[in-house]
Amino acid sequence: MISLPESDEELLRECEVSTFRSSGPGGQHVNKTESAVRLKHLPSGNVVTSQQERSQHRNKAICLEKLRARVAELNYRPADRVPTRQPRSAKNRTLEEKARRSSLKRLRSKPSEDE
């Protein structure tokens, strides 16, 4: 189980931060600024990137949210399933219904010739 620090500053100390120029529309602005952020969390090895905002600070905040969500997903363990037994009364009800259905089916069929 991976535990993350509460504050963003401590979490950033555990990460390797790199910036790069984002792709996509934006013209000259995109070609000049390195606003996209890539965070690599060294203890867990998770890598998250964000390039959706024009500001590097906002992209860094988005990356931290994504990292927290991904680590929480990795830490999630579903509860163990406890198999349950069907009660005897339920089994009896099923068998009675089956017998009733078969007798109704027999009554619907044409009588045989030899009788």
Image (cartoon, grey):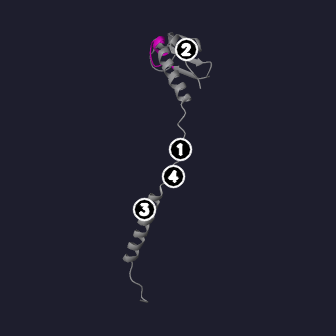
The front one of 51 and 9 is: 9
Instruction: Give the left or right position of residue 38, taking residue 57 as reference.
Output: right
Q: Secondary structure at mark 3?
A: helix
User: Considering only order in the chain, which callout, 3 or 2, is on the residue closer to the N terminus?
Assistant: 2
Look at label 3 and name its amino acid.
Arg
The front one of 1 and 27 is: 1
Say if the magenta span includes residue 57: yes
Look at label 1 and name its amino acid.
Val
The residue at which mark 4 appears reads as 85
Does the residue at mark 1 contact the one at mark 3 (Cβ under 8 Å)? no
Does the residue at mark 3 contact the one at mark 4 (Cβ under 8 Å)? no
Does the residue at mark 1 contact the one at mark 4 (Cβ under 8 Å)? no
The residue at which mark 2 appears reads as 11
The answer to which quarter of the image holds residue 25 is top left
User: Considering only order in the chain, which callout, 1 or 2, is on the residue closer to the N terminus?
Assistant: 2
Say if the magenta span includes residue 34: no
Q: CA distance from mark 1 to mark 3?
A: 24 Å
The residue at which mark 1 appears reads as 82
Q: Which residues are magenta?
A: 50-59
Q: Please tell me whether mark 2 or mark 3 is closer to you in this view.
A: 3
Instruction: Give the left or right position of residue 17, taking residue 97 as reference.
Output: right
Q: Residue at x 57, y 13 (%)?
A: 17
Q: Secondary structure at mark 2?
A: helix
User: Considering only order in the chain, which callout, 3 or 1, is on the residue closer to the N terminus?
Assistant: 1
The front one of 64 and 92 is: 92
